[in-house]
């Protein structure tokens, strides 16, 4: 299998190089009428297959329409004529021709398609593994050193294998610019792999245009790649939109280290406003701060509400309200707040004690946060969370 694969992919690479379809060394293949830009090593093969099939279709479309017009004119009914020709029943040479030629074409399509298929489905052995967990309605990416992120960050110039799992329903992992799409089935691991040789740089920096001031380039404008969930069978999959950032190897290594330690550098008492808003972005699809109830209850007034539960308090099931909140995050099904469904995913293994402390502090300080964005109020000093200059303490 692997030798066939190697032989075929070498052949494919040679064919692409010869036909000028090889990925340009200086950047992704540009966007075409049919396809977004092609930023992975398999993109040229996929696009080539599509082109071949398209051109065959154009050819036969033109042929059929042309013959139709010619026949309509040539064999049209003329006055006083009953039949212009004998009605033909059978024509062996013609039938053999229209069976053999399409068969050859279809086999050709199969060969071209199978070649890219093998490229797409067989991850190289030295691939860099990143775990992706899909859940209603978010992605969580985990890196070998324990770092986690909501957007996908990958190293440039080496194969990356994404190990996909779902913690609830079917999802589908899709990066159009990489021509990568794979379904995610609960209770099963699936893989997707790609290699992108062109760094996009960190968010907010565009390596291809260092002078570009804006972070929010429109999709397909080159700075970053869109990542979607394409399992459109529930209400929220269409909101699982994220970005892929491709970093050169040194930047990526540094990013992974920083990302795994981002909370360690923040002092305990500053966690709620320095880490809280970022952590809350993982809860905000379901919980609001402004009193609107969504998939889950709003956090407005959560501390008082929770303290009022009859199983919270000294000597009761949860000794303190913090205990209850902590359990809600790690074992959400243990107490399901009526009238809500048991729809919250567990964050066990994803949020450590420090992160949970940050969220508890966050809930205690909701009056200092913008209820719409979940960020610290702009009137407060971002370093101390105290009213900015001059205000009395
Ligand atoms: C997919 C939606 C969803 C996400 C994401 C989510 N939750 Fe929830 N959450 C719910 C639902 C639904 C409930 C109510 C049912 C229950 O108690 O399980 C709930 C309940 C809670 C409760 C109990 C509230 C109460 O009034 O008793 C806490 C605390 C909580 N969530 C914290 C979090 C935190 C912290 C995060 C982010 C790290 C988060 N949730 C992310 C859906 C979600
Ligand atoms: Cu999904």
Image: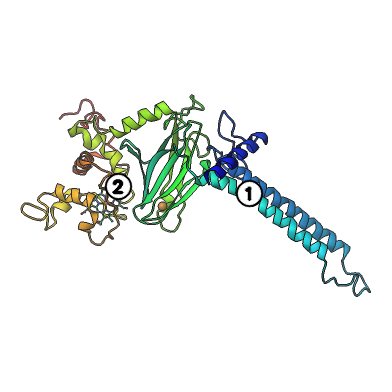
Cα separation, mark 2 vs mark 1, equals 47 Å
Give percent across and percent down for residue 369.
26, 40
Can you say whether 74 is above or below 81 in the image?
A: above
Label 1 crowd bin: few (<14), some (14–19), many (20+), radius 10 Å:
some
- Does residue 290 appear in this view? yes
Q: Which residue is mark 1?
A: 111
Give percent across and percent down for residue 305.
17, 53
Residue furthest toward the right? 80
Query: Is there CB contact under 8 Å for labels 2 and 1?
Result: no
The numbered dot on residue 200 is none
- Rendered image quadrant of residue 37: top right
Residue shown at 21% from the left, 29% from the top: 384
Label 2 crowd bin: few (<14), some (14–19), many (20+), radius 10 Å:
some
Q: Is residue 318 left or right of residue 119?
A: left
Residue shown at 77% from the left, 57% from the top: 65
- Rendered image quadrant of residue 168: bottom left
Residue shown at 53% from the left, 47% from the top: 1
Q: Which residue is mark 2?
A: 283
- Tally of numbered tags: 2
**Display colour scheme:** rainbow
Distance from mark 2 CB to nearest ligand 1 atom below 8 Å: yes
Can you say whether 187 is above or below 32 in the image?
A: below
- SS under mark 1: helix
Can you say whether 318 is above or below 124 in the image?
A: below
Q: Is residue 316 left or right of residue 183?
A: left
Q: Nearer the viewer, residue 178 or 88?
A: 88
- SS under mark 2: loop
Q: Nearer the viewer, residue 282 or 57?
A: 57
Quick one: label 2 or label 1, which is nearer the N terminus? 1
């Amino acid at each position: 299998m692997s030798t066939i694969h190697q032989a075929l992919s070498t052949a494919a690479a040679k064919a692409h190089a010869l036909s000028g379809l090889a990925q340009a060394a200086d950047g992704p293949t540009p966007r075409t009428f049919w396809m977004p830009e092609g930023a992975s090593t398999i993109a040229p093969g996929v696009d080539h297959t599509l082109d071949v099939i398209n051109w065959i279709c154009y050819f036969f479309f033109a042929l059929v329409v042309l013959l139709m017009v010619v026949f309509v004119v040539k064999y049209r009914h003329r006055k006083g004529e009953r039949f212009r020709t004998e009605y033909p029943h059978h024509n062996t040479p013609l039938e053999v021709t229209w069976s053999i030629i399409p068969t050859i074409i279809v086999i050709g399509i199969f060969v071209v398609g199978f070649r890219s298929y093998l490229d797409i489905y067989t991850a190289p052995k030295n691939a860099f593994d990143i775990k992706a967990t899909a859940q209603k309605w978010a992605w969580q990416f985990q890196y070998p050193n324990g770092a986690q992120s909501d957007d996908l960050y990958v190293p440039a110039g080496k194969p990356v294998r994404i190990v996909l799992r779902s913690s609830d329903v079917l999802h589908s992992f899709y990066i159009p610019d990489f021509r990568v799409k794979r379904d995610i089935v609960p209770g099963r691991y699936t893989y997707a792999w790609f290699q992108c040789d062109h760094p996009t740089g960190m968010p907010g920096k565009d390596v291809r245009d260092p002078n570009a001031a804006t972070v929010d380039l429109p999709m397909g404008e080159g700075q970053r790649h869109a990542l979607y969930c394409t399992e459109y069978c529930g209400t929220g999959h269409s909101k699982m939109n994220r970005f892929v950032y491709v970093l050169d190897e040194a930047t990526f290594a540094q990013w992974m280290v920083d990302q795994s330690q981002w909370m360690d550098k923040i002092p305990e008492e500053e966690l709620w406003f320095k880490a809280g808003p970022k952590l809350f972005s993982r809860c905000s699809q379901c919980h609001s701060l402004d009193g609107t109830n969504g998939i889950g209850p709003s956090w407005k007034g959560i501390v008082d509400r929770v303290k009022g539960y009859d199983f919270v308090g000294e000597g009761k099931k949860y000794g303190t309200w913090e205990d209850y909140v902590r359990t809600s995050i790690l074992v959400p099904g243990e107490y399901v707040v009526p009238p809500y469904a048991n729809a919250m995913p567990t964050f066990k293994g994803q949020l450590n004690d420090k992160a949970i402390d940050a969220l508890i502090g966050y809930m205690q300080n909701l009056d200092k946060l913008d209820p719409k964005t979940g960020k610290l109020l702009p009137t407060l000093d971002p370093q101390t969370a105290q009213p900015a200059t001059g205000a009395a303490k």
